[in-house]
Amino acid sequence: MEEIEQNKSLSKKEQRRQKRLEKQQKKDFERYGLKPEDLKGANKITNEEAKKGYPALRKCLRYFKDYKGYLFLIVFCALVYMGIGIVTPILMQHTIDYITVAQYNTAIRFALIFLSACIVSEYICYFWNVVSRVCFQKVVMKLKIDLIDGVAKTKTKKFDDTNSGTIISRVNNDADEVANVVGVVIDWVAEILVGIGFMIYLFFINVYLGLLIFVGVVILFFLYRFYQNYVYRMNKKQKVVRDKQVGMTTEIIRGIRDIKSLNIKNNILAIFHKQILFRKNIVVDRVKKSSLIRSTLRAFEVVIQVGSILFGIYLLQIGSISLGGLLLGIMYFSRISWFIQGFQQLVESVKEASVAAERICEISDDGAYPKEKFGNKQIKNPKGEIEFKNVFFSYDGVTPVFEGLNLKIEPNEAIAFVGKSGQGKSTLLSLIPKLYEVNSGKVTIDGVDIKKLSESGLRDLVTVVPQTPYIFNDSIKENLKFVKNDLTDEEMIEVCKKAQIHDFIMSKEKGYDSIVGENGVILSGGQKQRLAIARALLKNSKIILLDEATSALDNENQQKIQQVIDGLTKDHTVIIVAHRLSTVVNCNKIYLVENGKIVDGGTHDYMMKNCKAYKNLYKIEKKSVE
């Protein structure tokens, strides 16, 4: 019976907890637009999560090994600052005590020593801050460079199912958290030790006054813990609301052309107004409650201080404490209570840094972000022969794209892959520079398995011009110099003329110094493709892959680019993926791809005579043009 009653009691308690949770969730949704799933990743970091990240944190902190001199100076400054921080209140106490007994000369000496110590402390603090910032920024710089290097080495497949914002956050924010945790630890350990030193010295002055202040500090410790837990939860919610609003702002800016053309400005503004309202609500609510709690805490601190003063007056009357000792306790009570907040922040900073370190190591290590593997071979004087030998490939390991693909491409030829969308044409191109790795079989260049080639040995051999090339938010000249940093103006103009984009560039006010905007926003699709072709010509790889690289060009420019491509086959192997068959009729060989298989291949004339599927595609295209 007792067990049944206990279960009922627990059940009621759980029901009450559930009701409170539902009430809070309702408020979060109505006031801030937050759903429970929005906060799943925004919970307080548990001790278990932090402990899991401690090995990663230790690994990341090895970056400080290269800056031992800086660390020595930082620790030295912290120790000096801590020592002066403990000594100065004692000097002040002696100054006051000597004044009360009319020994003014001695009091003046102590006052001057106190002043000198404070001035030294300030300059030590200045030097400490400068050295710390320099050291931490050097570590952050190395961390971020290694992280970007880790991102660049990550297999392409990982980016297919990973939000780019997650990676950006790890590079920008997590590296800062890991580097700064050392500074936080040193800063707050110094403050905590100073506070403990004051506390111990107060017991020497008067054990009863020390005990009273100690009890007050312990109570403040738990009150501040409650306050910080509340602030932490609200900060997490505020961060989610802020991210939503910033995300909405980004979407509006990126989609401004579609917003205008669809005439949905009012609808979008209504949604944006809600996001702004939610952010205003959470900021106001957080300020209201946190200010109330903080004011209550400060009021309690005043109560303890006044209580200490009243008790100190009593001790002064009975001769148990000097005036200097009493004033010391009153003046530095706030310094003692300050280290409580430091301790809380220290614990949370280490927890957050440990989790950040784990996220960093996931990118830098070959685990959650698997890295590309290369060999060490180079091909001297490449011919440009490519062969697929019994290649099996699947993106997800379940649905096959290629099953036993065999194909040989002769050097210095123009080859085309045609067919309907989703048949594996672009995938086939992606396997050549090893953007994706085959599951079995092999791809060879001049008889060498591409897995045995070094990264530069492979990627210098192959250039890919995609259908939607990425153009960096910089000048046209800088976009070209990314390919060749010692690019001369003559070379730049030559390749742009070949790519049929020179005249357009010169029509711009700043010519080659024109900024193209985010992902080349001021360029049309055709202009992007021509600039990407110019980059490919500049790189001058032996193998050039064009994945619908002329799809956005008009007929006139397409014919001009076609002449460039025809000229490339004298010294290059050119492989083209195209939907418009009219762009590939002059290729040495045209392969029709269906369901990951090569149905047939040959010249345009051969395919028209012998491949019914190709002939039908060509007729449909010709009819649509007419």
Image: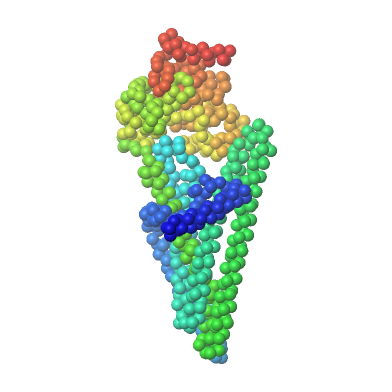
Residue reaching furthest to the front:
1
Image quadrant occupied by the C terminus: top right
> At 44% from the left edge and 11% from the top edge, which residue is drawn?
612
215 or 416, nearer to the observer: 215
Q: State the image coordinates of residue 460 (x, y, percent, origin top left).
A: 39, 33
Q: State the image coordinates of residue 398 (x, y, percent, origin top left).
A: 38, 30
> At 43% from the left edge and 18% from the top edge, which residue is drawn?
592
Residue reaching furthest to the top:
609
Inspect this view and state whether residue 92 appears: no
Q: State the image coordinates of residue 605 (x, y, percent, origin top left).
A: 44, 10
29 with respect to 61 (left or right): right
58 or 452, nearer to the observer: 58
Q: How does the figure colour the protein chain or chains?
A: rainbow
* Quadrant in which residue 309 is drawn: bottom right
> At 45% from the left edge and 58% from the top edge, which residue is drawn?
6
Q: State the image coordinates of residue 220 (x, y, percent, origin top left).
A: 52, 69
> At 57% from the left edge and 22% from the top edge, which residue is drawn?
554
75 or 456, nearer to the observer: 75
Residue reaching furthest to the bottom:
102
**For residue 17, above or below residue 389:** below
**For residue 83, above or below residue 208:** above
381 with respect to 555 (left or right): left
